[in-house]
Amino acid sequence: MKTPPVIQPIHAPHPPLTAYYADENARRGYVGKLFDNTAADYDRIDRLLALGSGPWYRNQALQRAGLIAGMRVVDVGIGTGLVAREAVKLVGDPALVIGVDPSVGMMAEAHLPGVQLVEGRAEAIPFPDASFDFLSMGYALRHIGDLSAAFSEFHRVLKPGGRLCLLEITKPERAWSQALLKGYMRGVVPVLARLIGCSAESAKLWRYYWDTIEACVPPSGVIDTLTEAGFSGAKRHIETGALSILAEYQAVKPG
């Protein structure tokens, strides 16, 4: 009988980026301060960055993962509310959507009447077991300290049969696509951000953003770690196109 492969869960989503902070112990403080300091500019630069990940795409991604009216949702890493805003439209009641984020500054920019906002981390979600029907996270996977711990928390707070949708930007497979996206995010977007009046710190955020994309663990590692955390049917959907960078990880807590 063939021995099944051993699943190796992923902890850090990428190695320490020492151009920004000294080591992994310093990463959490650096990232928290960076997002707090750039929160006021975040939505403007997100619109500038675009890359097809606007409201329509976020809405479609949530629907593909199974979000429907009446579900109770926790949006982890809610930030300024870009994903949660679409979740509210789909579930039909803002009181059904809870946002969790370690950045108080980012949540202060999430103008979502009726949505409860709670300070917390992906690795320690401040809600009881089996609290939610659906968990979403938009483009925050690369900023988590421990993916294995976070995915175990996701499994814990979901009800049996609960669904998960993690939106992420993936490094393109083709070398020319990588070079194009890198030049855009590390060079063009920071310059445009400064031209429209954003802070130097906000311009720096998007250079850091690319560097986390470039260094991030491969999709297979994310899927294996979701499986190891107890999810079933873990898979990755990627939007086709010239760059093919918009990905969604979907999974279900067995019911």
Image (cartoon, grey):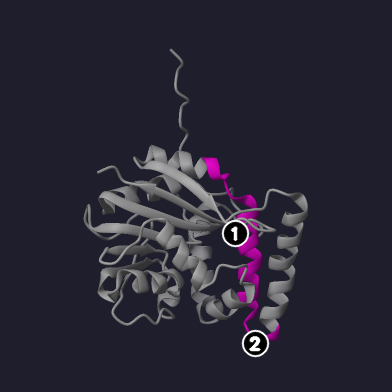
Is residue 221 toward the left or the right of residue 183 in the image?
left
Few, some or many residues within 10 Å of mark 1 (<14, 14–19, 20+): some
Magenta segment boundaries in residue numbering: 195-220
* Distance (Cα) linking label 2 and label 1: 26 Å
Task: Please tell me which residue is depicted at 34% across the width and 73% down the height of the picture.
Answer: 88
Task: Work out whether residue 247 or residue 114 is closer to the camera in this orientation and state it.
Answer: 247
Q: Residue furthest top?
A: 1
Secondary structure at badge 2 equals loop
Residue 92 position within the rendered picture, expressed as x and y whole percent measured from the top left: 29, 73
Quarter of the figure with residue 170? bottom right
Residue 31 position within the rendered picture, expressed as x and y whole percent measured from the top left: 52, 64
Q: Which mark is residue 21?
A: 1
Q: Is residue 191 above or below residue 159?
A: below
Residue 69 position within the rendered picture, expressed as x and y whole percent measured from the top left: 29, 67
Three-letter code, disc 1: Tyr
Residue 255 position within the rendered picture, expressed as x and y whole percent measured from the top left: 24, 44
Q: Is residue 42 above or below residue 11?
A: below
In magenta segment, residue 245: no
